[in-house]
Amino acid sequence: MSRVALVTGGSRGIGAAISVALKNVGYTVAANYAGNDEAAAKFSAETGIKTYKWSVAEYDACVEGIARVEADLGPVDVLVNNAGITRDAPFHKMTREQWKEVMDTNLSGLFNMTHPLWPGMRERKFGRVISISSINGQKGQFGQANYSAAKAGDIGFTKALAQEGARSGITVNVICPGYIATEMVMAVPEKVRESIISTIPVGRLGEPEDIARCVVFLASDEAGFITGSTLTANGGQYLT
Ligand code: NDP
């Protein structure tokens, strides 16, 4: 029987590439999303991957959503915490709502999704928790005090939980992508995009598939000795 993978924010952008890559190597995949029904329906029709709508920012919704996934597909073996948002503003203009929304989704979302799945993974003595942080959680970014704080928090969460999961066959890792050519990045003016690319040693933006391949590796049995690790995938833009 194939393993079950649940990808949050799995119907668009990097998450969609992760869902497809996992499906292509044999996982049964569930893709969660927040509200964009049209994109989710299109994704599901094109890929055959089932989509599930709830917000990772709400604990009870996660419990209920995970129960739906597990009733349909069986216990979740691989959790990919990919859902994320930005609410950028220079700090002197940042509102409490902008702070809270980003923390609720990008940091508390990891607690809300991992906590309900953790007891089952411990019982079954197998689990993979893979979270998508960001280069900006490693280096900080002007206008992103909220996002950088949340994404740095994802790394701390991973390092702590890796220690707790190790004896139960659960690995916990985090990936820090650099700039990836998703709709968001491709929407910035070409001149700005060119100036970003000029700071990336490999000379190009990342593709969603570059990150998806990292996830497939970390989810595999072959990666069983890797836990608590931060995998940087940024074309050499920031070296840790
Ligand atoms: P997109 O904006 O393209 O897609 C985000 C996905 O997350 C969507 O499926 C969206 O659902 C979902 N989502 C947002 N909020 C919630 C929520 N509260 N509950 C459930 N799902 C939610 O993002 P990207 O693909 O660009 O980014 C994916 C991850 O990678 C994020 O964590 C981001 O921070 C990180 N990242 C991205 C980089 C980039 O260059 N793009 C660089 C570094 C990190 P819906 O479709 O319903 O809106």
Image: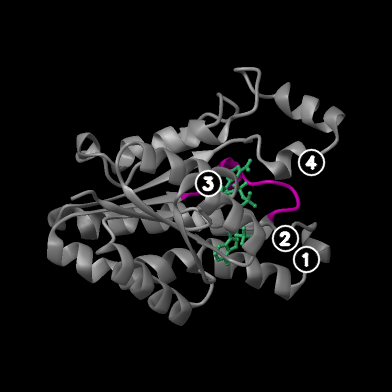
**Residue for point 74% across, 48% down:** 142
The residue pinned by badge 2 equals 87
Say the numbered circle drawn on residue 16: 3
Magenta stretch? 132-144
Between discs 2 and 4, the one toward the N terminus: 2
Q: Is disc 3 in contact with disc 1, using a CB cutoff of under 8 Å?
A: no
- 174 sits left or right of 25 in the view: right
Q: Crowding at label 2, few (<14), some or many (≥20) Cα neighbours within 10 Å?
A: some
Q: Which amino acid does label 2 sit on?
A: Arg
- Which of the pair 12/239 is nearer the observer? 12
The residue pinned by badge 1 equals 94
SS label for mark 2: loop
Q: What residue type is labelled 3?
A: Ala
Q: How is the image coloured?
A: one colour
**Residue for point 51% across, 33% down:** 209
**Residue for point 61% across, 45% down:** 136
Say the numbered circle drawn on residue 28: none
How far is disc 2 from disc 1 in space, using C-alphas?
Answer: 9 Å
The residue pinned by badge 4 equals 187
How far is disc 3 from disc 1 in space, using C-alphas?
Answer: 30 Å
Of badges 2 and 4, the one in the foreground is 4
Residue 98 at x, y = what percent? 72, 68
SS label for mark 3: helix
Q: What residue type is labelled 4?
A: Ala
Asked whether mark 3 and ligand 1 are closer than 8 Å, the reply comes as yes
Of badges 3 and 2, the one in the foreground is 3
Is residue 116 one of those drawn in magenta?
Answer: no
